[in-house]
Amino acid sequence: MVRGHYDSEPLMRLEGEIHFDAALSRAEVEAAALVYGRPMPPVAYLPCCGTLRHVPALLERGVEQLVAVDLSLASLRAGLMRNAPDVPASRLSVYHADVRHPDAFLPGGGVPFVFLGGNSLGDVTSVEGHAEFIRSLAAALTPGGVLVFDYVGDRYAPGTQDAVTEWPETYLSDTGDIAVIDTRTRRSSPVPGTAMSILRFTSKIRHARTGELIVEAHGYDKLVVPDALLAEQFADAGLELTNAGRMADLSPYHRERIRRTGDLGMLGEPDCLYRAVKEMTDHCGEGSR
């Protein structure tokens, strides 16, 4: 799998980034719980959990034990210090590990609920790796279990021309807060022989007054998969996929944030929540829904 682009510690110092935004994380969990549509189960799984930002809200909603996994050690360390410093080990198990091997850290038979936040489905950009990622998510679920995830898909693709967005930010340095300008460039390129594409992000952080470079240009990629193809890919892994609707329609917090700040990409209008249900298996071993 791929390590998080936030292994670059300076980007976690941007005040407007999502990693330590408790209100945003709580709103995402509330919307995910609505899409899940069941009482919270005793055990749930957070693959690609990043800075553990969804942990407090899920525990508050009644999950008794969370299993959280990520390949970015920097993100996990920051999350344990800032997002989940007082959560007892009996309620939170954190693994610096590869989500392709859920048997290494999940109960036998899987869990009934998996939440994948932060548009992480697009983090694996190879075609084969993407399919393996989906299979690993299916393997983490009990029969009838539910995966809820958010994904922008091709609603955010800028086309063949670069799309550039700039906005004022605050950089939390060791010597004090610095007013900066965050410039994000997005470029889309097709994956040959498929309906998918790669969305390349480049972020550059400069001092708002002097123009001095604070954080060097830093790039990361997302795999863009149209909904129709995504449903086929999930069906191949034994999961029935439904687009549950826009995050902004499911979350009053997101609607207000968009109204106040505009659409800053994945927080805004294009982001949708999805519900994927694992097929039940009858005694003959044949799948049924």
Image (cartoon, grey):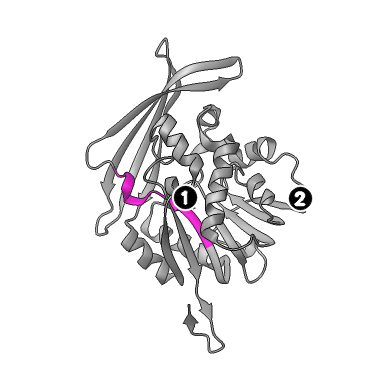
Measuring 45% from the left and 19% from the top, which residue is drawn there? 180
User: Could you tell which of marks 2 and 1 lies nearer the N-terminus?
Assistant: 2
From this viewpoint, which residue is outermost toward the left? 160
Residue 285, image x and y in percent?
Answer: 52, 85
What is the count of numbered marks? Answer: 2
Judge depth for marks 2 and 1 and give the one in front: 1
The residue segment tinted magenta is 147-157
Residue 176, image x and y in percent?
Answer: 59, 15
**Could you say whether the residue bearing mark 2 is in a helix, strand or loop?**
loop
Residue 57, image x and y in percent?
Answer: 64, 46
Three-letter code, disc 1? Leu
Measuring 50% from the left and 21% from the top, which residue is drawn there? 170
Residue 280 or 106: which is nearer the viewer?
280
Residue 76, image x and y in percent?
Answer: 62, 42
State whether residue 157 is above or below residue 279.
above
Three-letter code, disc 2? Ala
Name the residue that disc number 2 marks. Answer: 89
Is residue 131 among the parts visible in the rendering? yes
Name the residue that disc number 1 marks. Answer: 250
State whether residue 45 is above or below residue 24.
below
* Magenta stretch: includes residue 183: no
State whether residue 135 is above or below residue 258.
below
